Image: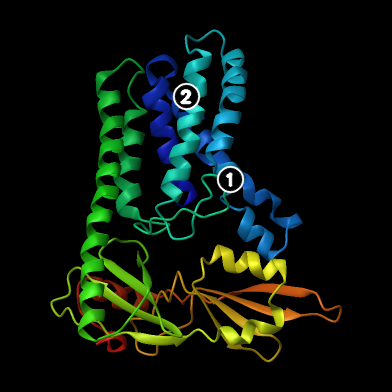
Amino acid sequence: MDSLTQIVLGAAVGEAVAGKKLGNKAMLWGAVAGTIPDLDVLLNPWLDTVQQLGFHRSLTHSFLFAILVSPLLGLLLQRLYRLHSATVRDWTLLFFLGFTTHALLDSCTTWGTQLLWPFSRYGVAFYNVFVVDPLYTVPFLVCVLAAAFYPKGSLRRRHLNYAGLILSSAYLLFSFVAKAAANRAFEESLQRQQISYSSYISKPTPLNTVFWSVTAKGEGGYYNGFYSLLDEDKHILFDFEPQNAHLLRPYLGNPKLARLLEIMKGYYAVAPAEKGVYLKDMRFGKFDGWREGGGAYVFVYHIWLDEKGELQVEELNNRPRVDQEYLMQFWERVEGEKQKGDR
């Protein structure tokens, strides 16, 4: 999730653990705990593209990191605030829950979080919320900010903080219910159109859990479609993307490519480029595939061999231009008004 959301979640967790003893200091250090896992990006200048993709959400997002680092920080903070009544156990629990809730919330998004690193590099992903969702964050933020204005012993302070935790958790629960409803619509539409598939990934489109996208793995390629829970017409138009896996043959056996395909969980398609190939991460699909003319896939990587025969990987920026027209069309589509691209 985005940094603001993780700060709010961490602050609420810190308050729940030690707010009665530390007041706003618990929120402050909870926010720090919610931020620390994402500091893995500070190593990016020393990593190539694939290393960045593989390292993000690995070590600092793992349960092992939470288990090992939390007691160390707990001891350090207890000594720093030794005049307060918070114990080493309180501080350790604050950091442990800050780290683990951060990682678990990230697991709800599409990218994947390596919770069991280093024992497994598999990116756990539930695909139930978008990385930025104001309906999750804004009510949560209001509750936590309001709680911060009350004294640490105030019952109203605790109630407001717990209200934020309950509202945000209830929204996550709703997202799973919404995902299940979207999955039924996708499966029924695929069946009606006699499209065979081995697996699929459904995920919410940006900023909401009403409008959903699906990528279904079929014979020789992928079927992409969109569905809003507010659609009256449950017929879903699927476009087909050939996988073209044969285009990767010149690069197979390269560990860098193998890691990239592992990160994509086998959901990839290939297109020829003037130099090398383009590798498309099909897990994310197209943010604006519902519009007429579609658009490009969100994550695409240009792959080629340099003069030394070494594999080079460059990420391309294919994000759609978000202007007033785009936002108006997007809102209309969320409300169930189909665009020419998915009628």
Residue at mark 1 = 117
Rendered location of residue 199, percent (x, y): 37, 71
Q: Residue at x 42, y 20 (%)?
A: 18
Q: Characterize the local packing of mark 2: few (<14), some (14-19) or many (20 or more) Cα atoms within 10 angstroms.
A: many
Q: Secondary structure at mark 2?
A: helix
Residue toward you, 211 or 178: 178
Nearest the camera: 294 or 3?
294
Numbered circle sitting on residue 93: 2
Which part of the image, by quadrant, shows the C terminus? bottom left
Image coordinates for residue 84, horizontal then vertical, percent: 50, 10
Amino acid type at image mark 1? Trp
Quarter of the image holding residue 183?
Answer: bottom left
* Vertical arrangement, residue 324 with respect to residue 195, above or below: above
Residue displayed at 49% across by 59% down: 111
Question: What kind of element bears circle 1?
Answer: loop
- At x 45%, y 52%, the residue is 1
Vertical side of 57 occupied by 268: above or below: below
**Disc 2 residue type (three-letter):** Leu
Q: Is residue 6 left or right of residue 343?
A: right
Position of residue 139 relative to residue 281, above or below, is above
Please tell me which residue is depicted at 57% across the width and 10% down the height of the picture.
82
Work out whether 115 lies above or below 245.
above
Q: CA distance from mark 1 to mark 2?
A: 21 Å
